[in-house]
């Protein structure tokens, strides 16, 4: 009897999550500098700063423990939860392999909730990154 392979890996917070809002802020400030008079620049800059960092604060910045099977079943636990209940998801064909990251589309096994996760190369080790990419590739073929 063959058993399905399962991989365990730790998904750490990415350094790109910390840099990306500052890149957005810099681009917005450059744009505002070019189109607005100097008096409104600081007020507009503050509004843009808050608008960019607000969603950034909602992003998960915690370590997650993932169990992934070859068939695309994804179980996830947060480090803060200890031995609490794992969330169960399934990879769907909307997941994409990109040169700089993996775009993982997950559908809840208990409902119709869809969730999207970016996995950057610096979040997991190279072997786990390749395994995840292989599973995503296989999901796109079926």
Image (cartoon, grey):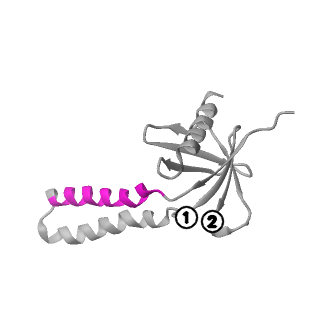
* Left/right of residue 119 with respect to residue 39 in the rendered view: right
Secondary structure, mark 1, is loop
Secondary structure, mark 2, is helix
Q: Which residues are magenta?
A: 14-33
Vertical order, 44 against 89 (above or below)? below
Task: Tell me which residue sits at (13%, 71%) in the image.
Answer: 39
Task: Tell me which residue sits at (50%, 49%) in the image.
Answer: 118
| Quadrant in which the C terminus appears | top right
Q: Residues within 10 Å of mark 1 (few under 14, many from 20)?
A: few
* Residue occupied by mark 2: 79
Tell me which corner region of the image, top left, top right, bottom left or bottom right, holds residue 84: bottom right
- Mark toward the start of the polypeptide (2 vs 1): 1
Q: Position of residue 99 (x, y in %)?
A: 43, 37
Task: Tell me which residue sits at (81%, 37%) in the image.
Answer: 3
* Residue occupied by mark 1: 62
* Left/right of residue 129 with respect to residue 44 in the rendered view: right
- State yes or no: discs 2 and 1 in contact (Cβ < 8 Å): yes
Identify which residue, 6 or 75, lies in the foreground: 6
Identify which residue, 125 or 114, lies in the foreground: 125
Tell me which corner region of the image, top left, top right, bottom left or bottom right, holds residue 140: top right
| Quadrant in which the N terminus appears | top right
Q: Position of residue 30 (x, y in %)?
A: 20, 57
Vertical order, 49 against 114 (above or below)? below
* Left/right of residue 70 with respect to residue 64 in the rendered view: right
């Amino acid at each position: 009897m063959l058993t399905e392979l399962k991989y365990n890996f730790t998904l750490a917070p990415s350094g790109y999550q910390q840099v990306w809002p500052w890149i957005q802020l810099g681009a917005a400030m450059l744009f505002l500098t070019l189109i607005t008079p100097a008096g409104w620049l600081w007020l507009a800059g503050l509004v843009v700063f808050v608008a960019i960092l607000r969603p950034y604060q909602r992003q998960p910045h915690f370590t997650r423990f993932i169990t992934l099977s070859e068939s695309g079943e994804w179980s996830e636990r947060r480090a803060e939860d200890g031995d609490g209940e794992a969330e169960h998801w399934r990879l769907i064909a909307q997941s994409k392999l990109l040169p700089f990251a993996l775009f993982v589309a997950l559908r809840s096994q208990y409902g119709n909730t869809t969730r999207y996760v970016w996995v950057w190369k610096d979040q997991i080790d190279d072997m786990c990154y390749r395994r995840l990419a292989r599973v995503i590739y296989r999901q796109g073929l079926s």
